[in-house]
Every structure is written in structure tokens, then in C-alpha cells.
Image (cartoon, rainbow, N blue to C red):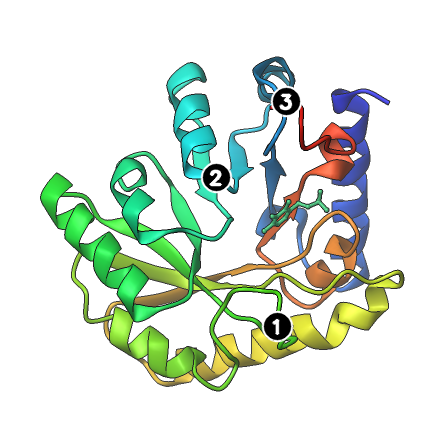
Amino acid sequence: MGIKENLDSVKTHIEAACASCGRTAGEVKLIAVSKTKPLPMLEEAYACGCRDFGENKVQELVDKYEAMPKDIRWHMIGHLQRNKVKYLVDKVFLIHSVDSLRLAQEIEKEAAKKNVTVNILVEVNVAGEESKFGTTSEEASALVEQIAKLPHIRIKGLMTIAPYAEDSEQNRRYFAKLKQIYVDIIHKNIDNVFMEELSMGMTGDYKVAITEGATYIRVGTGIFGEREYAAF
Ligand SMILES: *Cc1c(COP(=O)(O)O)cnc(C)c1O
């Protein structure tokens, strides 16, 4: 199947998942995860109406940013090293992967230099997987409170990457947990925190994530097909 057919299929599934839980499809924003994929494929997705693209490497995001139309919203969804922050802050629409105060402080420093405000999500390792980045569920709220003091950063919500699962229902509890942490933080009424977004769900589990409240889903394979890591 081509990109257009894949996108149509994903959108149909989004609508069905929303209908099944009383949400409207407009509440769920689809990020086309284009990491490792060549520009012609991004251009095809763009021609189909995609304006949100997700990348997990700074250099690749910046290269694609330069090459693609300027009305695209670029999402940094991968682990971010502090020494790369400076290349990103004025190009990225939302950084999904902020998991430490030190990283947030680096973003603050570079954002202040460029006189921009950077929108971020705090990444939470809800499942507690050792191989994954992200703050712990227990520390998420305290981290949000600390980052909220940085004037050039706007916290927009939370993100998680669920474990690989044969059966996506296995991940429902992790999505529910992230939503609960999110609601708890809202109730704390922290200044400079705008809890609006829950970034959760990928190709294998976005339907479950939607029924648990996702506002951003990140879909790569389901739009562009399998990735070959040597290709880019
Ligand atoms: C690669 C990636 C995705 C997309 O994964 P698919 O299974 O291909 O949809 C989503 N989120 C993050 C953080 C990723 O690195």
C-alpha cells in the first residue's frame, strides 16, 4: 500500500477509536514519524495533508527542516543530548522527550539566547523499562514543578513510549497511568504549566492509547512502512 492509502486507513482507525469512547477525531493529532525515511516520502505525506512530522535525531530533523516547506510542525521524539539542543530550539515545534532538569536547563539557556519559547513534554517511563529514557512515574510531578520555573520553556503535557507488545491491550494500563499522572499535575495548579497534551500510542497501540486519552499519536510504520535503518 502507498502512503495515501496508509494515511486513509490510519485516519479511519482514529475515527473509529474516537467514536468507541465518545471523543471527536479532532481531539487526536497524528504525527507522521518520518525518521530514516527519504524526503520524497515526506513530500508525499505532505501532499496528503500531513503537517506534523516526528524525528528522533537532531541532525536528521534539521536537514529535513531545511528541505521541507516551512508550515510543517517538527516534533522531536527521540532522546536528546544536551550538546545538540542549540541546533534545535528555534526549529522544533514540540520536544516530546525532556526527562531531566539538566536537559531542561540547557533548553532554557539556548532558548534565552535565541529569544524563543520552547514547547516541551516531559517523558515518563511509565512501564519502568530499563532500556528506556524518561523520568519515573514517582518523580514526574516534581520534575514538572522544577522545569516550570524556567521562563523560556512551556510545559504542554506528558509523553510515554510503551513497551513492545504483541497484544496492544497489554499497554492500556501504562496509558491510563500516564493520564492519571497528568490529571494529578493539573490539580496542582502549577504556574507556567499548560497540561494539554498526552503523547502516547504508536503504530501497534495507538487505538488503545486514544481510548485512554491520547491527544498526540506518533505513527511511523503504519504510514511509511517498515524502516530500514541503513537507508538514510
Ligand atoms: C519510531 C518511533 C515511533 C513510531 O513507531 P512506529 O511503531 O513505527 O509507529 C513513535 N514514537 C517514538 C518515540 C519513536 O521513536
Q: Residue at x 32, y 39 (%)?
A: 88
Classify mark 2 as within 8 Å of ligand 1 or not, answering yes or no: no
Q: Residue at x 66, y 23 (%)?
A: 231
Q: Position of residue 35 (x, y in %)?
A: 59, 34
**Residue placed under numbered mark 1 in the picture:** 130
Residue farthest along the front direction in this orientation: 230
Q: Earlier in the sequence, mark 2 or mark 1?
A: 2
Taking the image as shown, residue 42 lies to the left or right of residue 185, namely right
* Amino acid beneath label 3: Ala
Q: Earlier in the sequence, mark 3 or mark 2?
A: 3
Q: What is the crowding at mark 1: few (fewer than 14 residues within 10 Å), some, or many (at least 20)?
A: few
Q: Secondary structure at mark 3?
A: helix
Observer able to see residue 49: yes
Q: Secondary structure at mark 1?
A: loop
Mark number displayed over residue 57: 2
Q: In the figure, residue 72 lies in which quadrant?
A: top left
Quadrant for the C terminus in the image: top right
Mark number displayed over residue 45: 3
Q: What is the crowding at mark 3: few (fewer than 14 residues within 10 Å), some, or many (at least 20)?
A: many
Query: Distance from label 3 to label 2 (Cα)?
Result: 20 Å
Query: Distance from label 2 to label 1 (Cα)?
Result: 21 Å
Q: Nearer the viewer, mark 1 or mark 3?
A: 1
* Amino acid beneath label 1: Glu
Q: Nearer the viewer, mark 2 or mark 1?
A: 1
Q: Secondary structure at mark 2?
A: loop
Classify mark 3 as within 8 Å of ligand 1 or not, answering yes or no: no
Mark number displayed over residue 38: none
Query: Distance from label 1 to label 3 (Cα)?
Result: 34 Å
Give the vertical position of 224 relative to 216 (above or below).
Answer: above
Taking the image as shown, residue 3 lies to the left or right of residue 77, namely right
Quadrant for the N terminus in the image: top right
Q: Nearer the viewer, mark 3 or mark 2?
A: 2
